[in-house]
Each structure stands twice: as C-alpha cells, then as structure tokens.
C-alpha cells in the first residue's frame, strides 16, 4: 500500500531512467512521473530500454509512458516533456514522495537536488560513464545533499562513452534505494556513495558527511527551513 500510494518522479528516460522506471512500475509505484524533453535517437538504443527502433524521433517521455503502461496497467503514469529549470522545477516536483535522478545533465541534477532539499523530498542520485558509476541517496537534513558531496558541478560532456549495462546496473540500484525509502526497509545509502568499477568488477563505499556550510542544506539553511 505504501508503494501504491506513492508518487515518484523520474528525471530522464534514458540509460538510467528507463530501467529504473521499469522496475518501479513493475513493483507497483502508484503514480510514476517521467520527465524528459528529448527524442530518441538510434545511438540511444544500446542502453535506453524504453526506446525501440520504432520510437526513433519520438519524445522519450511519451514512448516511456506507452511501454510502462503496457507493463503495469494498474498504475498512473504521467509523461512530461518540459525541461527542468529553476523556473519550472517547483511545479514539476509538486507532490512527489521521491525523486530519481536519471539525467546526464549536472545543471539539472543540482537544480533537482536543491528543490528536493527545500521540499524535504528524498533524492536518489546515480551517474555513469563508460564502465564506471556511483549512486547515493539524499535524505534532506538527515545526511549530505549532492552539493555537499560534489561542491562544484563537473563539466557536462555532450557525448561520452557508455557501455549499456553500466546504467542498467545503476538503474537497478536506484530502484532498490527508492523502494527501500518508500517502504522503510533496510539501510539506505544516506551518507554513503557506492562506486562501481566495471573494469575490475569492484564495488567501494565511501562515507560522506554533510557540509555545515553547504549553501543548499547547511546548518543556517536547515534551521531557517524548519521555522
């Protein structure tokens, strides 16, 4: 019932967002919102599993909604083709119980992180490149936010190599974290970053701390937000 009553926003219907939303839909998340402004290209199909050959040129969010609806007709799926900006993010995350990071755009990630902290919405982040990736969960004011862990956004690369199974692996980890947060099961990655190296098949866990001076979730911000 916790899953059925939940509203989860997945930012991006690409290599991370596609598999993550499939597992969330299959698990029975009652209201799934897919946000992506882009259209599928042939080069996407090695990892973006909700985009098929017939979907090339079609909006990713709409194609994702079609597939997810066929996977589970008992849940509500919303497709949003709007870009996330500082002006639009408030409306796009309205009513969310949890947000999943499926984008490859650091500017969007940091905007989403800030809004999630402001609204106290759990935010599950993952990022991948090649055979490498990382995943963490942000629980606002209970652990570090994304800005605490990565103070400055890395430069965005328009096209970078991704082995299709790498985002698939991290999408499953994101979905697992999301389900655990919603249901209240087990221990999450709050205060930790799980890193995977596919070249030697190793996982490492880094302990991370909340930055008291963080401009997003620092002590002054947190105290003001609690008033």
Image: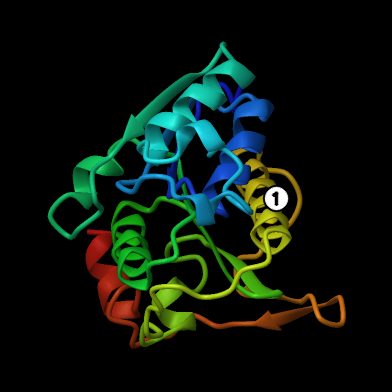
What SS does tag 1 mark?
Answer: helix
Residue 121 appears at what percent x and percent y?
41, 50
Q: How is the image coloured?
A: rainbow
Query: Residue at the location (44% across, 40% down)?
Result: 56
Query: Residue at the location (44% across, 24% down)?
Result: 77
Residue closest to the eye, 140 or 155: 155
Residue 68 appears at what percent x and percent y?
55, 26
Picture quarter containing residue 33?
Answer: top left
Query: Residue at the location (76% across, 50% down)?
Result: 186
Q: Is residue 104 left or right of residue 192?
A: left
**Residue 30 visible within the image:** no
Query: Residue at the location (23% across, 43% down)?
Result: 82
Q: Is residue 119 above or below residue 179?
A: below
Mark 1, Cα crowd under 10 Å, few <14 / some 14-19 / many 20+, is: some
Residue closest to the eye, 1 or 99: 99
Q: Is residue 122 left or right of residue 107?
A: right
Q: Is residue 116 left or right of residue 202?
A: left
Q: Is residue 222 above or below residue 80?
A: below
| Quadrant that contains the C terminus | bottom left
Residue 24 appears at what percent x and percent y?
61, 35
User: Among all residues in the image, which is located at the extreme top?
Assistant: 74
User: Among all residues in the image, which is located at the extreme left?
Assistant: 87
**Residue 29 visible within the image:** yes
Residue closest to the eye, 133 or 147: 133
Q: How many marks?
A: 1
Q: Is residue 199 left or right of residue 43?
A: right
Q: Is residue 72 above or below residue 55?
A: above
Mark 1 lies on residue? 172
Residue 1 appears at what percent x and percent y?
62, 20
Picture quarter containing residue 165?
Answer: bottom right
């Amino acid at each position: 019932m916790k899953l059925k009553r939940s509203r989860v926003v997945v930012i991006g219907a690409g290599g991370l967002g596609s598999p993550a939303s499939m597992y969330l839909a299959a698990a029975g998340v009652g209201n799934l919102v897919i946000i992506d402004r882009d259209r599928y290209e042939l080069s996407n199909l090695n990892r973006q599993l909700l985009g098929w050959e017939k979907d090339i040129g079609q909006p990713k969010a709409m194609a994702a909604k079609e597939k997810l609806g066929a996977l589970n007709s008992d849940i509500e799926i919303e497709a949003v083709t709007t870009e996330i900006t500082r002006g639009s993010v408030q409306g796009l995350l309205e009513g969310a119980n949890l947000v999943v990071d499926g984008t490859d755009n650091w500017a969007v990630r940091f905007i989403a992180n800030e809004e999630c902290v402001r609204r106290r919405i759990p935010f599950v982040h993952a990022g991948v490149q090649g055979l490498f990736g990382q995943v963490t969960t942000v629980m606002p004011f209970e652990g570090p936010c994304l800005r605490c862990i990565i103070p400055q956004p890395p430069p965005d690369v328009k096209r970078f190599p991704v082995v299709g199974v790498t985002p698939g692996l991290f999408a499953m980890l994101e979905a697992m974290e999301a389900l655990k947060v919603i249901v209240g099961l087990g221990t999450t990655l709050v205060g930790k970053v799980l890193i995977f190296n596919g070249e030697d098949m190793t996982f490492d866990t880094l302990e991370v701390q909340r930055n008291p001076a963080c401009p997003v979730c620092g002590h002054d911000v947190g105290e003001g937000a609690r008033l």
